[in-house]
Amino acid sequence: HLWNEWYSDYLTADFPRLIIRSEDMMFHTPEVIRKVCECGGGKMRDEFRYVLESAKGSTGAHHGAQGLAAAMIRYADAAKRVTGFTQDDLEYARKNLDPLLMEKFGYVTP
């Protein structure tokens, strides 16, 4: 419900906004960063460097957070994306995720 409401509000907003899917940042980082820079009137630096370790750090609430490679392995595999979800979670998603929003963002209901 929150996901539907949050993104519907942004898509119908009457102010300038930029919505970037996290998976696009993960799998197409330089291209996305270049487009964001251009959108804001800037220019991306010639040199691009990936941060391979967890960007969140490894202590406190983020202890055990994944780095780039582990995240790419998990989110590139449709089956691994839903690891930890119960059947009830998946059924709720199927019944409640807005199909128009899912299509707009290029998602498939799990």
Image (tube, rainbow, N blue to C red):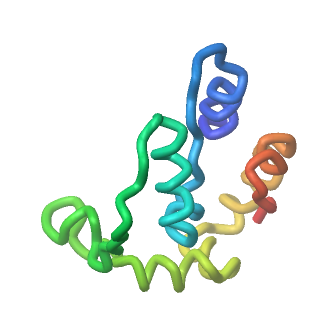
Residue 56 vertical placement versus 96 (above, below): below
Q: Image point 61% across, 73% down: which residue?
A: 81
Q: Image point 42% across, 41% down: which residue?
A: 42
Residue 15 vertical placement versus 71 (above, below): above
Residue farthest to the left, as pictured: 59
On the image, which quarter does residue 51 sit in? bottom left
Q: Image point 70% across, 67% down: which residue?
A: 87
On the image, which quarter does residue 28 sit in? bottom right
Q: Which of 64 and 106 is in front in this view?
A: 106
Quarter placement of the C terminus? bottom right
| Count of number-bearing discs | 0
Q: List x then y, in percent, for residue 39.
A: 54, 38
Q: Which of 88 and 32 is in front in this view?
A: 32
Residue 39 vertical placement versus 106 (above, below): above
Residue 65 vertical placement versus 77 (above, below): above
Q: List x then y, in percent, for residue 5.
A: 66, 29
Q: Image point 35% across, 59% down: which residue?
A: 45
Q: List x then y, in percent, for residue 105.
A: 74, 50
Is residue 23 found left or right of 98 in the rendered image?
Answer: left
Q: Which of 79 and 91 is in front in this view?
A: 79
Q: List x then y, in percent, for residue 75.
A: 58, 75
Residue farthest to the top, as pictured: 14
Quarter placement of the N terminus? top right
On the image, which quarter does residue 89 sit in? bottom right
Is residue 91 found left or right of 41 in the rendered image?
Answer: right
Q: Which of 46 and 53 is in front in this view?
A: 46
Is residue 8 found left or right of 35 in the rendered image?
Answer: right
